[in-house]
Image (spheres, rainbow, N blue to C red):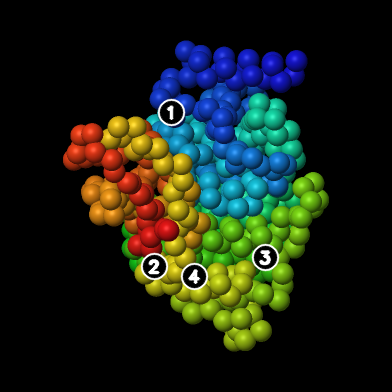
């Protein structure tokens, strides 16, 4: 009865007339699941309605964790969260570690105070944990209520992810903070913002502060000029106490996410590999101390920690040699190299002259598109005109908050030049964003 009642609640929630203005989103069918909660009028409750959409890797037994992709502030960014759990690149990371992929979408109207959700203490932290429990029952994975979290957040989502790491360090395997960090000191410009304390346990949580150079590093004025001072203050406060925190400055961007996923996903990959317990249900493991590399703040060269010259408590922390090398490429030009081809597509089906197939993304470089061959000759490349105003072109397209565009792009192709009645042999080849082709 518990399962049926939860399913009924979720069904009512997602079909209710109250769901406007967030009433357009990809349908959540297995392996996707969704719950929606109305805004709360209770003291301390979440002031906005929220959708939680989750993807469960097909065939997974017991989940080992959940990766959270959290959008930023404003109605446009909030709506972009509706497609986060459908992102093939982030799904590849989740599948590798036996994790679910969760994307919230807070229904914040333009002009409303973002702090009402991006501070977890204002009801969003409790709603998130309620969502995990209900989605666990809905999907047949009750362990969702107990597994560790790996958090990614943009702007206000970075504030939320960092806040959750400080509030629940025993649950957070790692947190990537793009263009937003929690405040540790009172804010004179916004006295209503409550500072977060930093408990000793949070110093063991790997954190990465990631921002664009035009957010106060090289561009000192404008709307986002305060991002760097906030990040620098957060970094220095946590690192001075020995916290495992780094900084990665994107040399190309302002507040948009750019190419950060090509460092964020490998970074989270390394942290999850080190910290998730072998047997689900055990405590998070500590990061291996002997593998760390360090780099000077605002620098571009990293060294093994034992070889670093300078004060380590003022140096950027990086988890291992591979990530240190990737970080050095990223802070130079965001071109993180990749020598591994993507997985081959599967399940190619041909009906008349219509093709359909499935494919998984390359965990290092995602999925840029496909090459279609007929009888050994290339007849098409998809997408036909690749574009991405925020970074490398990707097959699914990218919105401002690093999520696929709507409507979701389908893996289909119609061969308009096929000879009627003739027999043809087709091949589909995947291409990652580094230009490498699959078998």
Read off the residue under disc 1: 25
Q: Earlier in the sequence, mark 1 or mark 4?
A: 1
| Residue 243, numbered circle | 3
Question: Where residue 240 sits: x, y (%)?
Answer: 65, 69
Residue 370 versus residue 323 in the image, above or below: above
Could you tell me how far apart the alpha carbons at marks 3 and 1 are, in whole angstroms? 39 Å
Could you tell me how far apart the alpha carbons at marks 1 and 4 are, in whole angstroms? 35 Å
Residue 309 versus residue 171 in the image, above or below: below
Q: Secondary structure at mark 1?
A: loop
Q: Quadrant of residue 286?
A: bottom right
Residue, x 61% and y 81% (percent of image)?
A: 304
Front position in the image: 214 or 29: 29
Mark in front: 2 vs 3: 2
Query: Mark 4, residues whose alpha carbon is within 10 Å: few (<14), some, or many (≥20)?
Result: some
Could you tell me how far apart the alpha carbons at marks 2 and 4 are, in whole angstroms? 9 Å
Q: Are marks 1 and 4 in contact (CB under 8 Å)?
A: no
Query: Mark 1, residues whose alpha carbon is within 10 Å: few (<14), some, or many (≥20)?
Result: some
Q: Secondary structure at mark 4?
A: helix
Q: Earlier in the sequence, mark 2 or mark 1?
A: 1
Could you tell me how far apart the alpha carbons at marks 2 and 3 are, in whole angstroms? 28 Å
Q: Are marks 2 and 4 in contact (CB under 8 Å)?
A: no
Could you tell me how far apart the alpha carbons at marks 3 and 4 are, in whole angstroms? 21 Å
Residue, x 48% and y 19% (percent of image)?
A: 19
| Residue 130, numbered circle | none
| Residue 326, numbered circle | 4
Mark in front: 3 vs 1: 1
Residue 78 seen in render: no
Q: Secondary structure at mark 3?
A: loop
Q: Secondary structure at mark 2?
A: loop
Read off the residue under disc 2: 335
Please identify the quadrant where the C terminus is shown.
bottom left
């Amino acid at each position: 009865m518990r399962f049926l009642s939860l399913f009924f609640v979720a069904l009512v929630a997602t079909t209710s007339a109250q769901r406007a203005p967030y009433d357009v989103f990809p349908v959540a069918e297995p392996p996707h699941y969704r719950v929606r909660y109305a805004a709360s009028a209770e003291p301390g409750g979440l002031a906005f309605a929220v959708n939680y959409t989750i993807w469960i890797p097909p065939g997974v037994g017991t989940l080992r964790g959940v990766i959270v992709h959290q959008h930023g502030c404003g109605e446009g960014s909030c709506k972009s969260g509706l497609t986060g759990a459908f992102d093939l690149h982030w799904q590849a990371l989740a599948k590798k570690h036996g994790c679910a992929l969760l994307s919230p979408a807070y229904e914040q109207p333009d002009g409303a105070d973002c702090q009402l959700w991006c501070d977890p203490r204002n009801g969003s932290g409790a709603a998130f944990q309620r969502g995990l429990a209900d989605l666990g029952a809905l999907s047949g994975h009750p362990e969702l209520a107990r597994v560790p979290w790996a958090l990614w957040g943009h702007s206000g989502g970075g504030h939320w992810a960092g806040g959750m790491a400080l509030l629940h360090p025993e649950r957070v395997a790692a947190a990537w903070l793009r263009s937003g960090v929690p405040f540790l000191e009172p804010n004179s410009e916004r006295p209503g913002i409550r500072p977060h304390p930093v408990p000793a346990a949070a110093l063991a949580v790997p954190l990465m502060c990631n921002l664009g150079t035009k957010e106060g590093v090289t561009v000192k004025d404008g709307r986002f000029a305060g991002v760097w001072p906030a990040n620098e203050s957060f970094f220095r406060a946590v690192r001075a106490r020995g916290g495992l925190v780094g900084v990665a400055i994107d040399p190309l961007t302002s507040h948009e996410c750019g190419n950060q996923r090509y460092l964020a996903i490998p970074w989270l990959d390394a942290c999850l590999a080190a910290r998730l317990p072998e047997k689900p249900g055990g405590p998070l493991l500590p990061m291996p101390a002997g593998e760390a590399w360090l780099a000077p703040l605002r620098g571009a060269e990293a060294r093994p920690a034992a070889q670093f010259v300078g004060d380590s408590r003022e140096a950027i922390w990086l988890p291992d040699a591979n990530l240190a090398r990737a970080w050095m490429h990223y802070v130079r030009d965001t071109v993180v190299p990749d020598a591994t081809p993507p997985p081959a597509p599967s399940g190619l089906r041909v009906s008349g002259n219509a093709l359909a197939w499935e494919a998984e993304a390359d965990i290092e470089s995602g999925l840029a598109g496909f090459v279609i061959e007929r009888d050994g000759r290339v007849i098409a490349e998809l997408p036909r005109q690749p574009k991405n105003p925020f970074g490398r072109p990707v097959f699914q397209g990218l919105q401002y908050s690093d999520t696929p565009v709507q409507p979701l792009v389908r893996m289909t192709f119609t061969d308009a030049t096929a000879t009627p009645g003739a027999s043809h042999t087709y091949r589909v080849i995947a291409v990652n964003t580094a230009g490498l082709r699959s078998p």
